[in-house]
Structure formats: C-alpha cells, structure tokens
Image: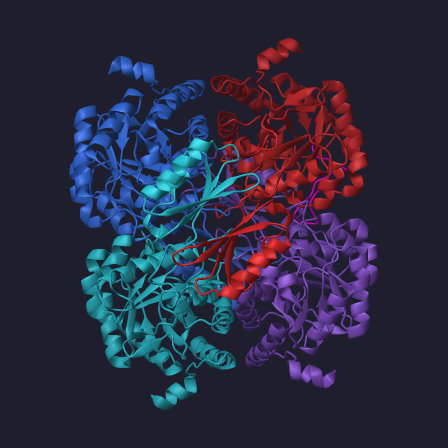
Chain colours: A red, B purple, C cyan, D blue
Amino acid sequence: MIIVMKPDAREDWVRAVIDRVEKEGLRPVLLSGTERKVIAVIGDERRVSEEAFSVLKGVERVMPVLKPYKLVSREFQPESSIVRCGGVAIGGKECVVMAGPCAVESEKQIIETALAVKAAGARILRGGAFKPRTGPYDFQGLQKKGLEYLQSAKKESGLPIVTEVVDPRDVPLVGDYADMFQIGTRNMQNFLLLREVGKTQKPVLLKRGMQSLYKEFLLAAEYILSEGNRNVVLCERGIRTFETHTRNTLDLNLVPAVKELSHLPIVVDPSHGTGRRGFVAAMSRAAIAAGADGLILEVHPAPDEALTDADQTISTIQFAALMKQLAAVADAVDRVLPSPSESVACG
Amino acid sequence: MIIVMKPDAREDWVRAVIDRVEKEGLRPVLLSGTERKVIAVIGDERRVSEEAFSVLKGVERVMPVLKPYKLVSREFQPESSIVRCGGVAIGGKECVVMAGPCAVESEKQIIETALAVKAAGARILRGGAFKPRTGPYDFQGLQKKGLEYLQSAKKESGLPIVTEVVDPRDVPLVGDYADMFQIGTRNMQNFLLLREVGKTQKPVLLKRGMQSLYKEFLLAAEYILSEGNRNVVLCERGIRTFETHTRNTLDLNLVPAVKELSHLPIVVDPSHGTGRRGFVAAMSRAAIAAGADGLILEVHPAPDEALTDADQTISTIQFAALMKQLAAVADAVDRVLPSPSESVACG
Amino acid sequence: MIIVMKPDAREDWVRAVIDRVEKEGLRPVLLSGTERKVIAVIGDERRVSEEAFSVLKGVERVMPVLKPYKLVSREFQPESSIVRCGGVAIGGKECVVMAGPCAVESEKQIIETALAVKAAGARILRGGAFKPRTGPYDFQGLQKKGLEYLQSAKKESGLPIVTEVVDPRDVPLVGDYADMFQIGTRNMQNFLLLREVGKTQKPVLLKRGMQSLYKEFLLAAEYILSEGNRNVVLCERGIRTFETHTRNTLDLNLVPAVKELSHLPIVVDPSHGTGRRGFVAAMSRAAIAAGADGLILEVHPAPDEALTDADQTISTIQFAALMKQLAAVADAVDRVLPSPSESVACG
Amino acid sequence: MIIVMKPDAREDWVRAVIDRVEKEGLRPVLLSGTERKVIAVIGDERRVSEEAFSVLKGVERVMPVLKPYKLVSREFQPESSIVRCGGVAIGGKECVVMAGPCAVESEKQIIETALAVKAAGARILRGGAFKPRTGPYDFQGLQKKGLEYLQSAKKESGLPIVTEVVDPRDVPLVGDYADMFQIGTRNMQNFLLLREVGKTQKPVLLKRGMQSLYKEFLLAAEYILSEGNRNVVLCERGIRTFETHTRNTLDLNLVPAVKELSHLPIVVDPSHGTGRRGFVAAMSRAAIAAGADGLILEVHPAPDEALTDADQTISTIQFAALMKQLAAVADAVDRVLPSPSESVACG
C-alpha cells in the first residue's frame, strides 16, 4: 500500500499516519519527494482497509499494491483450471458450446431443442426455469415444472443441464436437477446466493454483472471459492454502455484479461451480448478467436414464437450452420470444437 | 405500439404482421409512408411483448407507445404520495433527513450517533446490520446483534429506524426491528426480495441500481406495489459512469424526472453519490434545491475510525453545521427542514 | 511515481528498472514487500512518461503520485481566480447568469431576447453563430451574420457576449465580436483550437467534453493557460451515460471537485445537462446550491419555434420566474444573484 | 415520424399538432388509442426536426421512423463499397492490415518498421506525424518532418501511407504526403475537418469517437460523403466505459452492425481498443473472425522505447507471429490475409 500525503501535510500528520501503519502490524517506509511525502507500507495490506488510512489528516490518496482477490488469481494457481460438468471438461483444449432456449416453455420444446443442439455439436443444454424479469407483469418461468422438463430433455439427449438459480432457498431444489448452476447478471453481487452455491461442489456458471468491473467479477467468484467450491466458470455477457443499438456491449477484452489474471475458464454469451439475432454468429466466431473456452447460446426450434428473448435467439437450423463456422475458427486458433457432421456420426 | 417495416418488406410479410396483431386482440392500422410501411397498433399493448412482433419477417423496429409501469405512474395517481415511517411523513412539505453510520458497530456508537443526529434535526436513524460487501473478506455487519443495538438507539432517541434487508428469508426478522426496510443498490433487481417486502405494509426505501435506467427503477418499485405495499420511497444514490474521481456520479436529474413520471417520494444519498466526505455538503444542498423530499446521510461520531465507508462519512459536528445550511436552502425552495436549534428546542 | 514489480520479477529486471529511473535523472528507492518489490521514484515525475517504465520487463503497474496538470491546480495558486468578461466578474461572490438562445436566428430575435434576459437579471448574453451539428443536413448557424446580430444586441442591451468558436481559423473573426469565447463539448480536446484561444487574452468558457474525465478537463484548460491566457471559466454541461431519458447526465459532483482541485471558476449548463425544458429550473437551483459560480441557460422569446434545441429552451417569461427562485437559493448559500425586480429597478 | 400525445392532451392541442404537420408539407394520420392519441406523419421526415413537434403543447414523445443518414446507408447503396488506397482494395475479400508506430520518431525507425511490417504481410504503413495529446506537455509529433520521413519509408517499402490530420488548415499539406487521411477519435465530430477531407477524393480512415453512438458515427461519415468524397473506411477503436483495466472497451458488435446498416468497409484498431500489448493478438483474431475488413495495429521495432503508446505497441517480431495466426483465422471465415512467408515470397 502506498500512502500519498498532501503537499501541505504537517509533520505531526505524517507521524500519525506512520503510527497507524505500525499499529496495524505493518512496516512504514517514509519517502520524501520533491513536492510530497509518500509512505510505503510493507506487509500483507489485504488485512487492512484502504479507508483506515485515506481518512487520516493530510492524506491525499491511498493506492493498493496487492490485488484484493486471492484464490481465483493466477498467481495463487498458475495452471489453468478445468471444470467438469456431467462428463464435459470446460477449460481444456475443447471449446464447449452450451445451447438451448432462454426459457423452458414446454416438455416438447425443450426435448426437441436438446436433440437438435446435440446433433449440431452442443455439449450442454441450457434453459431457464426461474426467470428474473425487469417488469412484474412479464412471464416468470415455469419454475419447478420447468426443472422437470429439463430432466426429461436430459434423459432423452444425454446432455447435462445448466439452469439459473435466483433464490438462495432454491439451491437444494435446483441442485437436484441441474448439473451446473447458473448465476445471472443481476445476481452477480447477490452475495448470499454466491455463498449458497459455494457450499456445494456443483459447477457454477457465473455471469458478469452488466455494470461490473473485472475486479468485482473476480471478487464475486472469490466468494464462491472461499466457501470451498472451486468449480467456477466465468461468463462474459455484455455490459451496459451508452450505446443503444445493441442490448449490451459485448466486452471480449475480458477474455485475454481473465486468461492473464485468473486460472478459471471463461465462456461468452453472444446472445445477451448483442441482443440481436443477426449479430450472434459474428460475435460467436469472435469469442472463439479471442480464446474463450466456450459459448452459451440461445437456440429455439421456432425462435419467432419464443416467449422471452426472441430478438436474440437463433433457430436450431441457424445453430447447426454456425457450429460448422465455429469448428473452422476453433481449428484456426488451435482449439477443438465438434462440428455437426461429427456429432451426427457419433449420435 | 408502432411497427416499422423494412423498406423492402414484401406484401405478404406486412400481411403476416397485421394478422398477428389481430390474433393478439389488438387493432392494426396500416400507414404507407414514402419509404416504409408502418403499422400502428390500437389497444393495450402492455399485454403483448414487443418481441412478438420484432422478430417477424420484414420488421425493422417496434416502438412502444405506453409506459411499461402502471401503479407507480403519475398518470395512474396524479396526487403525490406521502409515505409514513414511524410518525414521520415523507413526501410532504418537510424535507426528511435520515442519518446514521454506514454500519452499526457497537451499542455505544449507534446510541451516541442517534442522539447527536436527532439533536441536529434528523428525523430517522439509519444504520446497517447486514452489509453486502464486494469482497468475501470484508466486514459483513453485526447482523442480529446490530438490529438489537438499533432497537436500543431507537428507545433512547425516539427516532424510527431504516435498515437494509438483503435476504428474502430475513424479511420477518428485520421487520421486527425496522420501521422501514432499505433495499440496497445491488438488490434493486433482486425480484424475490422486492416481492417479499411487497407483501408487508412496512415502508420501503428503494435505492436505484447503480446501472439502472429510470424505467427499470420505476419497474422495480412496481414489483413492490404490485404485491400490495404502496409505501415506497425512491432513493437516488449515484450511478456508475466512466468518471473515477468520485465513487459514483450522483444523477440529480432523476429528481425532477421522478416528480414528472411518478407520485412516489424521492430522497437522495449524497454519501454514496459522491464517495467523498468533502463533497457531501455541496451535494446535499443541491439535492434539496432540486426538489428532493429528503436525504439519507452517513454520519459517525468519529468517522476516521468507521469500519466501512469512512471516506464518505461526515462527523456529527459536520452534520449539525450542514443541517443549518440545508434549512436555509429548504426555505429558499419553499420547503421546511428542521434546523439544529429548533430541534434542540423541541427535544 | 511508484513502480510495482510482478511477484515473479527477476533480480536483473528490477535492476534494469532502477537503471532506467536513474538514467532519467530521478532517484529510485527499492522497497521489498512480502509479495512484491516496489520502486519509489523521487523527483519531478511529470518530465517522464509512465509508459517509459510500464513496458519494462517484470513491471506490473506504474502509479503516478503527482497530478499531470500544474497551472490550473489549486496547489499552484491557492486563491480562487476571478475572470472578468466585459465588466462582469465571474468567480466572486456573485453568481453570474449567462442567457440567450441556442442559435442566433435573426436580429429581432436576439435583441428581443437580450433585453428580456437583461431585465430578468442575466449579466451576459449567449447565442450561437457557428453551430456544430451532428448531421450534415441540420441548420449550421448564421455564421458571420449571426455575429453581427449579436453585436446589435450588445449595443441595445449593454450585455457582453459569449459565443462559440469552432474553427481555429475563425479565432480572430469571432474575437472581434465576442467578449468571451465558448469552446463547445465536441471541441474540448481540439487542441489546436485551445492553443489559438490561449494565445489571446480574451476570457474562454470551456465546456467539458461529454466523455471527459475531470483530469482531462483540467488538462484541456491547462492547454489554454500554458499559452498564456489565464482567463478560463470551466463549464459542466452533462456527460454521456447509459441513461437515455435525459439528453445527458448533469454531473454536479464536478462543482465541489473543481473547487478542491483548481482555482478556476466553474459554471453549469442545465439546458444541455438535462435536455428537457421541464428539468431546467430544478437543476439550475441545484447548481447554485452546489456552489457553482454561475449558469449558462438557453432562453428564447418563443422556444417552441426555436430552430435548434427547442426541447431544452425555456421562455423569457419562465426565465424571469426562475431568476427569482435562484436569487433565493443564492442567498441561502451566501452568494448574490440579481433578481428580476432589482434589475428592473436598475434598468 | 410518430407523434405520441399525452393522455390528457386537449382536442385543440391535437388539432394544433396536425396543423403544424400540414404546414410542413407532410400528411398527418390521427390514431385514437385506448389511452393516448397518436399522430403518424407521412412523407420525408428528414426535412423537419423532431423538435419542431416535441415542444408543442400536449406532445409526450416524437419517434423518428427514417434513419437520419442517407448516403452511407445500405438502403441507399445495397452493394458493399470497396475503397482503394494506393493500389490496395479495402472492403473486398482480402483483410487489409495497416501497421506501424504510433508516432514517427526518426527516419530510421519508420523505414525499419515499414520494411519489417511489409515482410510480415502488412499492406499499408501507419505512423503519426501530428499527434493530438491529452496534456500540453506531452510529445506532439514531428509534424512536417514526420511526413517527410513517412515519404522516405514509402519509397523504400512501396507501402502506401495512412497518417492523421488534425487541423483543417493542414489538409493540403498532409494530402501531399498521405495516401489516406486518418481522422482520430477526438476529431470524429470536428465537422470542419470532416468537410475539408470530404472536398478531396483521397480515402479517409474515420475513427469512431470514444463516446459516439453508431448513429453519430455514420452521420460523421455522411458529412464526408455529402461533400463528394465516397472513399471512407470506418474504424472501431474502442469506447469509453466504466471499465478501467483496459484503456477502452473494444466494441466488436459494431462490425456486424455496420455490415447491416452501411455499405462502407470497417476495420478495427485493437491497439487502442485494449491499450494493452498482451491483449492485441487475441482481439486482432476476434476482429477478423467478426468480419472486419482489416486491422490497424501499432508496431515498433523496439516498443519499449517508443515515445507514445508503448503500453499497447507490439514488436515487429510479435507482429510477424500474429500475422500467421490471422491468416489462419481469415481462412476459417472465408477471407484472405497474406501471411508472412507468402509476402516474403512476393517481395
């Protein structure tokens, strides 16, 4: 920690800061610059709050030197983590595609989608049973019934399931059906929910808050790891900016940033990241080329009739075509992504 | 709802849109412009999603005409609401100041603060017992013990209590102690929590999400009203922008906007809205001058020793001085705000 | 300057950084922390770029200690500057209101406005002759003719003139007519234009770029001062955020920030800062209460017929009513603002 | 244009709006909805300002139906434009890479870079002679001398030159040396400069303003086309958001958006779009995968010694390695990008 004093800081104020540093069990080093005095603090600064110093008399600024997270950092664990979800490894050489409808609408719809996306190469089925919606009068999901339909689709297709949990009270219930919990963008800082899923050993797909700094995103993951669950997959899904032509601004810079800062896998959601069906293919290709470990995509057999997010959902036919493009891009960046034909051959 | 067709939309695509409008029980009116066809939809469009149309072939854009919220709108209720919290009326001629520490730290601290802010003219005591924190290793509040200390402070000072609830499971517990629930910025779209407090009749202080549009903020309030609880007070606390010199950008434009769009009272939080102790007085005055119905301020007997938010907390002495300034500003805009001396006279 | 090394930085990399610091004529101090090595740099760091160090092997981060601007800072000049514009002092006890139409449209319009705003207490007349417009097909201002009409209005009313200059080639022309140059938001980083007005001694009203950090805003002012012209008045006019209900988000936090960081006066433009006529009065009051040294307001005799910015322009009648409110608020914060009646008495 | 009246709009107010529409030579169609009256306007609305109506009594909102730009739109010209720069076609099947230092520093440096990037497959040389810098004390470029060095590098390498012009007065001078003008992010709305380059026939690389909406970006290009110069190449270079870990947020969503809205080519600048050397390769691959027509990259023989933008500049060796990766990605998305070996073979 570096404490910068104001140019007019009095001797006794500087002294008081030094005393406080020592009181915290840290070692102060005083540096007298040309215009200001600076106090460098030696020791593990994470144990004290910056504010303990920033409010002292004569202090202009406090600058942390260490990162505020630990378990998620690549310094703590240099080798990349591989997270396993129902037999599928996320974070390895294969780019894993998760696909399915925004919301589970009926048993028929979800089974039909599961079989179609599997045939096209998807490895995990997504589908929302509990839907957080901006307005109270919007469709809120089929809830428990939705989970049961997901189970049927899993049985029919063999695909593991990722689905959102929104209520800390529902973690056991959703855990009975899901192979992977999804934490949505609005809940990235719902710390109770993070702690609840952190107490399980089930993998967690953690979506970035639409207003979250990289640092806050990694701290949210740290909440889960600090409870003992290390199976976290990060997900970039677009941030809110001044641009309104797209629903969100997909921030692919996060992909190389996470690779540098953390050992956790990162996948990308181009459906929410663009909000426009016509942009999903381009941004899916871009995400793979940037080094993402996978994608999560909204796919529906008849997207024009989808009850939610129809604007950004592609059809199962478009999805199959996209998977072929993605296989080529993955190959170009030395990754693997199963293409439709191969999957059909296997199936 | 207005549906704009693409310039090259075929006749049968236009026909399909018209059919869909009629199928939804609404009335379409076709307008042939110079470059595009437009279909105006007559009827209560809130019952159908924009996306039902935006995804149809040849549709370029769908523009809603009605607002998505109803119960909170000034059209629904033209006269301003007055929300009562333990005998204090919010939304009337008086500007109501809520003050207290960010977090309850000890019984002594909260009682001392309560008595001091009361003497200076505060009408409601704030203090956090459950603290949502960005990092898992930060102080998370005294929890139940904090609620008990708040109760002592209420008994000693006579001030009603506003305190944050973060877990839907805790609504009954917090409700036993609080005169008013606070929903924090990270929970503005925690819809389960909104519904839980909506099922009570206790007043709710709803803070704007740091990334929320005015529309989303009003829809969050609509969640609470739609459950039957009409006692909602809105609170602007700053939004996240590119500026980093301040913790948030306080958006006072929201004050006249809420006065136009809604009948609910609105108060302002300049502590979080600036994140800097030295800016709190200026922005408190500004908020009152803009027409806010009150303020919520972080005040501590010894702010330099506060465990949380020390950077933005003012001392009880600074608070008393500020209240005198605020009384003068309130008077200038034809509002009332009790000044220290008067309160002392009453007390 | 503080240089933080990566945890795995080799001895010889640290050595190389130290050598480079010395080569720049600065003094390095090596601090060995628990997890990282840190090199503190003693001397005037403004002479070297941060990037000279951030790119060296093993460097994690470089943190500046000094501020990048000098002449505009309050450290450089502790007492507040007063800028004089045609006999009017900006930055003193009086809050100075500049008012007039967005664009000069005709001689009659600008004279009529000038007389009306003067009667209501305005001290400076604003009006655009050169208009930067987002689209090439929009009205671009009356240009030289507009300047001549402004001169007539000045002659009739006695009010000094502030008007925008957009082209460095036009600085002499506009300078012949204007008492104060206005630099618009889109030109805040038009460094050539800043240098040109910096070479004159005429006061400059510098509007904040809609995307500019406080630091960049002050550096833009530094450009002008560094050329020798110290007569700069800063102007907050709203920034671009995710909110779309208002044209911009008026960032009043900047007012106390400028008062702390700089000696220059700051005024506020609530017309652009809200983009909504109905919000102008509330935010004008707020700006004065926050400590602004004045306002710049769009006023038109018949705003509904204004060729530009009609949405945010108030009528001369509304302006007179607002000035009475503002006089009361100014009085409450120990400032002076001439109210209509007084002005009429004088006139 | 669609004019939505307030729910309480009086009959005569509605009448007045209709009259005004007719006065403008447009045809009004009145629609009486369940809660509001709406007036649809038939005719070319681009000729009238929205504000002419939004300010009329009883009007709640005005929604445009047509897009504000014309010449740049894909509706106006369905086939994609190909812009030629010194024999290189931008917008065709080949992805064109422009590379070179941020600033021209010496004749040796620029010639060495030119030869190296050419050998690696670059088709155009970039290099700044006039540098707009945030602070007045930063290096401002070699100016005319820089242009001369660029000419030497062109002669030696055969690569055409793109370089920034910042002053409308310098358009003829820069035009004597450059094969393509660059308009930087801070000048995207410097309308005088846009008009000046619009009067030439030289290609223009127009960078998106860091705060600009897609609509404003296309309108800036419209300025150039409206003067007669149709040789415009758009460039995404990152926008300013709340995230600070990266210098900007690279908005690749713009690539598919431009492909839909406009016929102009679009290239991407991952150097400014990330501000971090370590992220440039990932985002370059992503841009090509998203469908960009090319890249512009900061490359330096010894980036650690670069005078400007060292943080985001890659070395000529890293550049050659990157070009091989890009050739593979281009191939995967059915585009062509010359790889180092091929170029060497040709050269």
Range drawn in magenta: A127-144
Single out the residue that lies furthest toward the top.
Answer: A345
Residue drawn at 73 percent across, 60 percent down? B105
Q: Is residue A139 magenta?
A: yes
Residue drawn at 58 percent across, 64 percent down? B270
Answer whether residue D7 is visible to the viewer in this image: no
Relative to A184, does residue C329 appear above or below in the rendering? below
Say whether residue D322 is left or right of residue C8.
left
Relative to C266, does residue B167 appear above or below in the rendering? above
Residue B215 placement: quadrant: bottom right
Q: Is residue C153 magenta?
A: no
Q: Nearer the viewer, residue D104 or B264?
A: D104
Single out the residue that lies furthest toward the bottom.
Answer: C345
Relative to A172, does residue C181 appear above or below in the rendering? below
Say whether residue A298 is left or right of residue D313.
right
Q: Nearer the viewer, residue A170 or D281?
A: D281
Q: Position of residue A234 (x, y in %)?
A: 61, 33
Q: Position of residue B307 (x, y in %)?
A: 67, 57
The C terminus of chain D, quarter of image: top left
